[in-house]
């Protein structure tokens, strides 16, 4: 199993290297050269398996023999016993044919834990085998950072720096990043938006000398292994609803397009998926693209679902690559247009997009109405992100089963929930110290040089490579 870049000009990598690489050296994203297929018999047998066992079925073919199956089994079992629910990702039925897939039972109460917890174990495994270290730099709109720090705080081989937009993440989200005290963890408040943070990370990846100097690795959803680990719950949910005989639709609260791309990948692997619905908040670039065939950036709006307050959906590039018949030249052209004009027209690829996805955007009023309605009718509290999914599901329901991905626990967004339902959902008891523990973080301007200097000085790999020109001061 090899991995190729969506822009066609980066080296082909094996699984271990793609795990550590993040962004490809040509600025593209890695995708598997071929899609492994799970047979109907295998899919039919999944309903009898645990979540960790389903993860192994899904993931093992992507590793191309690099990780012996029994080692992967051990890592998956270890990862998912740490979750707060025995089923890991339980399916809650609100009414016949309408289900919520709870993906928020990990340590940071958002779906990102499902992949990140496994990714950290996979990376440590591969680094250990090589006797190497890595430096992870990531940008977060709120949830990735906490999930990444929580996953890597016990890593012996990784230093991690997470950039978050100052004042634009919830208190709970910020505290999940700033309260861990391990020396390998660095949370940094950037004076800018999430897109600024993401641009800084991309620029560091594109500075190849810097990238090599600190052994830079990525854990944003540009990292293939995260998408891979998210495919698991599409299979686990569909298996519970009768796959391979039943076709299931999924409504996916979407920001960077990573989660829903995992659903698209599940379809390539043989899962019977009916509709894949891109659910947005008022930052509706993707539903607009489905409707118009033009991807056009606008200003980012702050909403009650901050993890979806995004105008650049990085993983959409992976879809465009597939939908264009893997035309790397076309994709590189799209991305040049986007950089120059903040827009590009999909041309013929837009027809495929309409066939493969539905889209729907929820206004802030839609979100509030959905949260109140579901609480009143079903006694179930949706968080604002999941509520966008619920709204989108309502606009595209057919006769079959519909699964709304619950991407966060409502307690993660207490201010937004209080504004909608008049009460702050309590945090699960395992997080009781979160709101009172001391916080540790650095603040930096939206400036590439300043951030690179910081990363180099905090990274054990970077410090070893330092010359007298990159002074880190006496604080180390
Ligand atoms: C990250 C996140 C999303 C968006 O997921 P993408 O993979 O970026 O599309 C949605 N909801 C929550 C709660 C998130 O943390």
Image: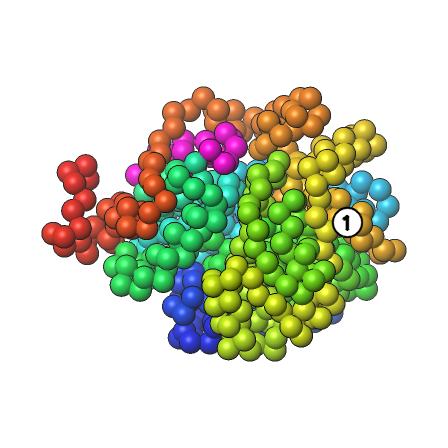
Residue 18 is a magenta residue:
no
Q: Looking at the image, which residue is at 74% across and 38% down? A: 366
Task: Judge left or right: residue 336 versus residue 467.
Answer: right
Residue 341: image location, x then y, percent: 51, 62
**In the rendered image, the vertical position of residue 423 relative to residue 242, given as above or below:** above
Q: Is mark 1 within 8 Å of ligand 1?
A: no
Count how many numbered circles sit on residues in the image. 1
Taking the spot 81% from the left edge, 64% from the top edge, the residue there is: 245
Residue 473 or 359: which is nearer the viewer?
Answer: 359
Question: For residue 286, what is the image quadrant?
Answer: bottom right
Question: What color scheme is it?
Answer: rainbow
Q: Is residue 281 left or right of residue 337?
A: right
| Furthest residue toward front | 341
State the quadrant of the C terminus. top left
Residue 426: image location, x then y, percent:
61, 24
Which residue shows up at 15% across the image and 38% down it?
Answer: 474
Specify the quadrant of the image occupied by residue 213: bottom left
Residue 2 visible (yes or no):
no
Q: Is residue 80 left or right of residue 385?
A: left
Q: Is residue 174 magenta?
A: yes
Of 18 and 278, which appears nearest the observer? 278
Residue 191 placement (x, y as % from top left): 39, 39
The vertical placement of 387 against 274, above or below, is above
Q: From where the camera sits, is residue 319 visible?
A: yes
371 above or below 245? above
Find numbered disc 1 in the image and state the secondary structure of the residue it sits on: helix
User: In x, y percent, where is residue 25?
Assistant: 38, 68
Residue 369 vertical placement versus 16 (above, below): above
Seen at 74% across and 67% down, the residue is 355
Local packing at callout 1 (Cα closer than 10 Å; few below 14, some 14-19, many 20+) is many
Q: Which residues are magenta?
A: 167-183
Would you name the residue on which mark 1 appears? 393
């Amino acid at each position: 199993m090899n991995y190729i870049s969506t822009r066609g000009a980066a080296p082909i990598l094996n699984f271990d290297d793609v795990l550590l690489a993040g962004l490809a050296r040509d600025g593209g994203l890695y995708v598997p050269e071929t899609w492994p297929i799970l047979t109907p018999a295998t899919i039919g047998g999944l309903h009898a398996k645990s979540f960790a066992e389903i993860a192994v079925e899904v993931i093992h073919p992507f590793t191309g023999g690099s990780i012996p199956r029994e080692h992967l089994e051990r890592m998956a079992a270890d990862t998912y016993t740490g979750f707060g629910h025995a089923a890991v990702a339980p399916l809650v039925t609100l009414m016949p044919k309408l289900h919520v897939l709870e993906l928020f039972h990990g340590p940071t109460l958002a779906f990102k834990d499902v992949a990140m917890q496994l990714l950290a174990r996979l990376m440590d495994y591969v680094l250990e085998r090589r006797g190497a270290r890595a430096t992870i730099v990531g940008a977060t709109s709120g949830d990735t950072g906490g999930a990444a720090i929580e996953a890597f705080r016990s890593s012996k081989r990784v230093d991690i720096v997470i950039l978050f937009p100052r004042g634009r993440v919830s208190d709970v989200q910020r505290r999940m990043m700033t309260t861990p005290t391990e020396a390998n963890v660095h949370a940094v408040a950037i004076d800018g938006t999430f897109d600024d943070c993401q641009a800084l990370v991309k620029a560091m990846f594109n500075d190849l000398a810097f990238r090599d100097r600190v052994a830079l690795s990525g854990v944003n959803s540009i990292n293939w292994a995260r998408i891979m680990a998210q495919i698991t719950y599409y299979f686990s949910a569909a298996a519970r609803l009768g796959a391979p005989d039943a076709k299931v639709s999924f409504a996916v609260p979407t920001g960077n397009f990573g989660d829903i791309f995992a659903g698209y990948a599940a379809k390539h692997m043989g899962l019977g998926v009916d509709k894949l619905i891109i659910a947005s908040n008022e930052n509706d670039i993707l539903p607009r693209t489905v409707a118009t065939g033009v991807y056009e950036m606008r200003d980012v709006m702050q909403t009650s679902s901050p993890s979806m307050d995004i105008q650049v959906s990085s993983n959409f590039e992976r879809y465009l690559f597939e939908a264009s018949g893997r035309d790397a030249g076309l994709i590189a052209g799209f991305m040049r247009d986007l950089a120059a004009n903040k827009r590009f027209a999909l041309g013929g690829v837009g027809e495929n997009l309409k066939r493969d996805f539905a889209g729907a955007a929820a206004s802030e009023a839609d979100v509030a109405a959905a949260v109140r309605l579901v609480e009143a009718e079903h006694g179930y509290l949706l968080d604002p992100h999941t509520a966008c999914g619920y709204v989108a599901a309502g606009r595209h329901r057919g006769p079959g089963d519909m699964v709304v991905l619950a991407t966060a626990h409502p307690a993660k967004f207490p201010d937004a929930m209080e504004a909608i339902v008049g009460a702050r959902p309590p945090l699960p008891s395992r997080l009781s110290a979160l709101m009172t523990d001391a916080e540790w973080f650095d603040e930096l301007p939206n400036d590439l040089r300043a951030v690179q200097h910081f990363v180099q000085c905090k990274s054990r790999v970077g410090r070893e490579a330092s010359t007298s020109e990159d002074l880190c001061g006496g604080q180390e």
